[in-house]
Amino acid sequence: MASEETVTDGSQARPRRQARGQQRIEQILHAAAAVFAEHGYDAATTNAIAAQAGISPGSLYQFFKNKDDIAHALADHYASQLAALRGEVFTRESIDDASVEDLVDTVLGPLVAFNLAHPGFKALFARTDMPAGLRAAVTPIHTAIHHRVAELIGLLLPDRSHEEVARIATVTIQLVRSMMPLIADASGPERDALTTELHAVLTSYLHQHLS
Amino acid sequence: MASEETVTDGSQARPRRQARGQQRIEQILHAAAAVFAEHGYDAATTNAIAAQAGISPGSLYQFFKNKDDIAHALADHYASQLAALRGEVFTRESIDDASVEDLVDTVLGPLVAFNLAHPGFKALFARTDMPAGLRAAVTPIHTAIHHRVAELIGLLLPDRSHEEVARIATVTIQLVRSMMPLIADASGPERDALTTELHAVLTSYLHQHLS
DNA sequence: AAAGAATACGAGCGAATGCTCGTGTTGTCT
DNA sequence: AGACAACACGAGCATTCGCTCGTATTCTTT
């Protein structure tokens, strides 16, 4: 796992982190997630993130180049969390002979739970129009997600062209992205009802492509 | 709570606009739409709007209280445009005995055309997380749209409760809102394909509720 | 122990931005 | 014509925000 890092001595000269530093990094990311979740990315100030993390602005910049860098690191963090979630949710059997309902069922529950557990996630990913810096930070993960979803949809619709599958994946992701904030902001029974609606949207949409 | 300033005349003492002023207002709104569309609401600066309109910052503030006020006026402008569009699209016969496909068909085309013709519209309405000021400016129109859509859905689903109809309307609007930027950003055939997808999403979703 | 690196601080810099203000010009009303 | 309101200008104020810098402390390594 590349633990012993090859200090490509090149231009970067990253500091060799101590244990304290790693803790700080996690503190900062956690704080950033909270601030992004509460105020959104634009309105979130780096000083507010530092304050939330209980450190000074100067300390923050010992670990991150700038605000976009924080977003990028946080996005990476969420990406690995999502990858882990995917590993848990998908077992061999569950993919092979899956109906649309089964697929949506297995994915949607954990996905909603993930969004509720990580309120900063949608602040980074669910925006339709992003400032350039945020877009750059988020695009790679977004692409990875698209790749995964396209894979699944390719299994459901083996006869479709690559372009069609890609488009259906894009639409599917967009549907989920747009509904998630609604679901997260709702409470209790309304949240469940909206989740059911999203379920209906996805199954009926994909089902239509099957026939 | 009220302002300390003297007085009294309950109404705000708005200046009586001259013809020149009305022209300026329209210039400014047009410019604001362009700037919002290009940079988004947050990144749009009032000085940039003034420059785009070919006037000085000071002149801009003779017609609008602040940036939010511009957004509010622009939102109102779009609201009336939309109302006019609705009047054109819906004739008596088209509503009465309409299938889901018919309804989606009649509405979607003009709606896409509207969004393409008014690029500033989605910059104001299509965001999932809005700064407080923008939200306040946009909420009334958003509510009005919801009311209209709920009306239509109530016709389609006469047996559902008020809450259910409201929820389905919310979801429907959200689906359109999220897909519209995708459609607008696409070009030519891909745009048509995405429009077809949105059509499929809406019809299959609403159809599912019919059965 | 000594040196160098990593961590920590926080006042404040430079730039950007929403908006104002003093002043001058054009239109309207009597 | 005179008076007053509407319109116009643009330099710059007040504030915010991302980020830096000088300095001080803690850890690692020798």
Image: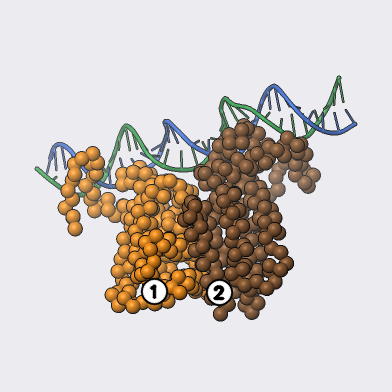
Chain colours: A orange, B brown, C blue, D green
Does the image show residue B114? yes
Residue B3: image location, x then y, percent:
70, 45
Q: What residue type is labelled 1?
A: Leu
Q: Which amino acid does label 2 sit on?
A: His
Is A57 in front, or is B199? B199
Q: How many marks?
A: 2
Report whether mark 1 lies on the same chain as mark 2: no
Compared across the picture, whether C5 is left or right of A206 comes to left
Residue C23: image location, x then y, percent:
68, 22
Does the image show residue B134? no
Is A89 in front, or is A99? A99
In percent of the image, x 70 and y 55: which residue is there? B84
In percent of the image, x 27 and y 50: which residue is there? A21
Reading the image, the residue beneath label 2 is B207
In percent of the image, x 59 and y 66: which residue is there? B104
Reading the image, the residue beneath label 1 is A103
In percent of the image, x 43 and y 64: which residue is there? A168
Residue B206: image location, x then y, percent:
56, 72
